[in-house]
Amino acid sequence: MISSKIFRAAVVLASAAVSPLGTLAQANDITYVTVSEVSLADDSTKVADMAALHNNREFIVSASLVWNDAVYEDGAPVDLKWEMLVDGVSSAQGGMALTDLRQLPTSLDAGKGVVTQTGAHTITVAVTLGGGMSSSDENIESFSPGASFAPLVVVIFFAATTHMVELALGLGIFTGACMVAGSLTKGFRMMLDVYILDALADKDHGYVFLFILFMAGLVGLIEKSGGLKGITLALQRYVKTAKTAQGAAFFAGVVIFFDDYANTLVAGASMRPLTDACVVSREKLAFIVDATAAPIASIVPISSWVGFEISLIQTELNRILEQYPDTLSIKTTGFAIFLETIRYRYYCIFMLFFIPMVVISGRDFGPMLLAERLTRVYGRTDGGPGAALAVDGGELVSHNAPKPETPCRWWNMAFPILMLVFYIFYLLWWTGKQSAAPGASFLEIIEQSNSYQGLLWGTMAASLTGLAFYFIQDHKDDRIIWLNCKGYLSRAKRMFSRMKAFCRRGQQEEEEDDEGDHAQILMDYRTAMAAFLIGMEKIFGAMVVLTLAWATGAIMQAVGLNRFFGDVLTNEALDYRMLPTLTFIVSVLIAFATGTSWGTMTIMFPLVLVPAYEASNGDANIFYGVTAAILAGAVAGDHCSPISDTTILSSMASECQLMCHVKTQGPYALMVALWSILVGTIPSGYESFSNGISLLLGFVFMAFHVVFTSEFAINKTGRFDIFTEIYLRCFDRKNEFLLQLKADVVKAYETGEPVEMSEEQTPFEP
């Protein structure tokens, strides 16, 4: 037998010696092509790079190909064949002829597959060319579509029961990672090595981290310089009531319209001392800051949001233009469509109606009314029970307060903030100028801007400018001395004397004048560096939550929650006139689950826009309504989500406990979202009445809620809002906390003075 094998091998070698190179390649079974990677996409929603499968849902298999240089040789085989197997069973196969070797395919559509049972599965793609074969496997878990809600349920349950959002997010990530990995140990490793590490390694996230750190450092400098206290003292001459303090916070949010991150951080940090002095709860400040930032930034044509939104719209518009080049019934540019959608963004517009109504009326409802009463009735100037706590559970005490002798002047806050606004606005224009076409308009330049770079560079530039501003100020006897040249010479002289004494160690030091007799610099470099670092230190906890929130958003997509919602929207039996409404609802749910409005837009636009145009036969009203529903729904869900970056930043800047902010803002956001559907997206889809009527009705119903379902923080009878009263009378008549609070409201109304909380009274647990 051995001799026969040797004989056959000799025959092959002898024939190869006189054969062309191609025959030799086949004889040696050269691998002309290698399958480097197998990737999966959902067939229904076209969501790519799936990390897990859903049972009984078809998926598309594609493979990446890497070619050997031998394929270019004369006589190389040209018949490529492939086969796709699911758990070892052939599911699809095919072939193609390589007619042009100069343009070899780098990817291969290997067909469709489906799995029916929960558990681990292996998807294999095998490719054969000539005598060589290559294959690659993708090991992946599968479960029912409903199971994709598990990480979200875990996050919500533990956040509500433990009031520890870090624990809730961590458990949610761990749950999702175990579902994707198929085991506890591998899931634990993936939670750390993949999801949390990826959240930290993402370049855009790095920009956000650095921007937040530099912004917090700038706030630390402003606080140490006495600027925060100075602006509070200056505004107290004009802002003396809770209404005017809240109005100032809303005005600050409107003025800083160009970016939601800058809006929340600047408005929250600058208005917090003022609202505290006017006995406004931290929950109310966080709501005003958060609910103003994204709505105003998303609809103003000059903001860091616009370029991102327009790029998503333009991508889908290009797909529509390719399919319908001659029959297009909508605007042909992304910016023009963006402008058309503004009037359909009912949630953003209604929320901007609602906030000033609440501020001017002084009325609230639900958990926000309780938060306001617990602050106003007991005269708390520390932000109330919802104020952020230290690690030990005590009151959060600033270790960065200005020295007692430091004069507190308003301009030491106003100047750095004005420079911050200038730098960011200028750098948005400058970065856009680098990408925009020659002759582009100002709006087009802003659209092309890199908001991450503009925010990062602008914040650091403002910090350095503010530092230089503090260096040119000296103070003495509560006076500010500008460019104190005499003082600079005196300090130089004293420094020289110290150096001289140091060099003469064995001799008697020369007597110096008492430094207290001289003007002191407002902030020296050592104090400035310490203040900058203390400012950064304050937001470390928020950075941890933000990292976990990003990782949670990634895990929601990994388990396929976006595919579950996408399937609802692509149902062919759906009446296309309901598309704006369903798109808005699904966008809210995805934004709530993932905690990112921009991520929601990225998911929803490819999923909905082209099908909506086709289903409505190019109806412009439906197309603009669906586009607006994505943009507005992403903001609405973001407002309700405890893992949203802006929700976290708003609570951080306002120094409000995160879950207190979520619980008090949630009912307001849901109410506005409900009326956005009832008088906005539904009538708009069915064209029941004009868009102007929808906006008018929205204004009317916002006013209705403020007048008829809300109550003053302090009133004659102590009555709560209608919703709390129904709960108290029908479900919990003997709630001692609410009954005691009602009695204290009456007492505060009658005396006109804050009520002292007795030691026996049960404290409010946020």
Image: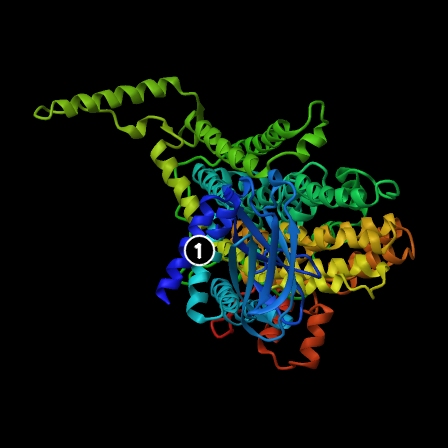
> Badge 1: how crowded within 10 Å, few (<14), some, or many (20+)?
some
In the image, 701 versus 411, the foreground residue is: 701
The answer to whether residue 714 is visible is no
Percent across and percent down for residue 373 are 61, 63
In the image, 519 versus 216, the foreground residue is: 216
Percent across and percent down for residue 336 are 79, 38
User: Left of 114 or right of it: where is 221?
Assistant: left
The answer to whether residue 501 is visible is yes
In the image, 503 versus 246, the foreground residue is: 503
User: Left of 615 or right of it: where is 131?
Assistant: left
User: Left of 658 or right of it: where is 689?
Assistant: right
Percent across and percent down for residue 106 are 59, 46
Q: Is 295 rendered above or below residue 515?
A: below
Q: Amino acid at mark 1?
A: Leu
Residue highlighted by disc 1: 396
- Quadrant in the picture for the N terminus: bottom left
Residue drawn where x is 55% and y is 33% of the image:
420
